[in-house]
Amino acid sequence: MINNDILRRISAIFELNDEKIIATFALTHCEITTAQLADFFKEKNDDAYQAITDVQLAGFLNGLIIAQRGPSDGPVRDNEQVLTNNMIFNKVKIALSLKAEDVIAILELADLSLSKYELSAFFRKVDNKHYRHCSDDVLSAFLKGLKTHNQ
């Protein structure tokens, strides 16, 4: 999925205004200006469109975890340089303190059925033989189900 779309969808799910989005970025020392944020939300065919880098999106998602769960002890971790759908899925799951049963129920709201075993494969280490890549369709279904769940 496109990082800008993920930011748009998560912002809508959590009903975050520009001020809250910028504050969420700032929680991980990722400074975003109001002008940059406006460019992130523009359509791709707009000349002012600016793509969100993986580092910036990681900063937002890590900030979301801090905003939802509170700061952890110790220093703020560095934001990941590269994000995968699996990492994005996991960060949103962590931010909301969702258990496997919760995630399965949310996916079912978007008409996607997964077993607990299939779901756990998304959250394994990449070198684990049971690791499974999270497709755009699965991540999109999760965000769609989350939106329905939060209404």
Image (cartoon, helix red, strand yellow):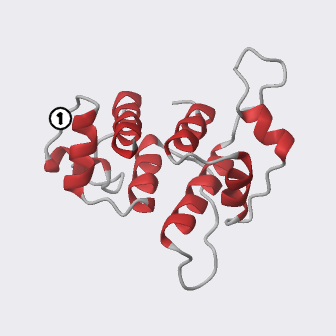
Q: Is residue 3 left or right of residue 125?
A: right
Q: Kindly tell me whether residue 129 is visible in this rendering.
A: no
Residue at 56% from the left image edge and 45% from the top image edge: 15
Residue at 51% from the left image edge and 30% from the top image edge: 1
Q: Position of residue 94 (x, y in %)?
A: 41, 61
Camera-side residue: 101 or 18? Answer: 18
Farthest residue, direction bottom: 73
Camera-side residue: 46 or 119? Answer: 46
Residue at 47% from the left image edge and 47% from the top image edge: 88
Image quadrant in which the C terminus is located:
top left
Residue at 79% from the left image edge and 51% from the top image edge: 32
Q: Is residue 132 above or below residue 91?
A: above
Is the residue marked by circle 1 packed among few (<14), some (14-19), or many (20+) residues within 10 Å? Answer: some
Q: Position of residue 30 (x, y in %)?
A: 74, 58
Q: Is residue 39 above or below residue 119?
A: above
Q: Is residue 39 above or below residue 81?
A: above
Circle 1 sits in a helix, a strand or a loop, which is it?
A: loop
Residue 23 is drawn in which quadrant?
bottom right
Q: Is residue 1 left or right of residue 45?
A: left
User: Which amino acid type corresponds to the residue marked 1 in the rendered image?
Assistant: Ser
The residue tagged 1 is 113
Camera-side residue: 85 or 126? Answer: 85
Q: Is residue 42 above or below residue 56?
A: above
Count of marks, rendered view: 1
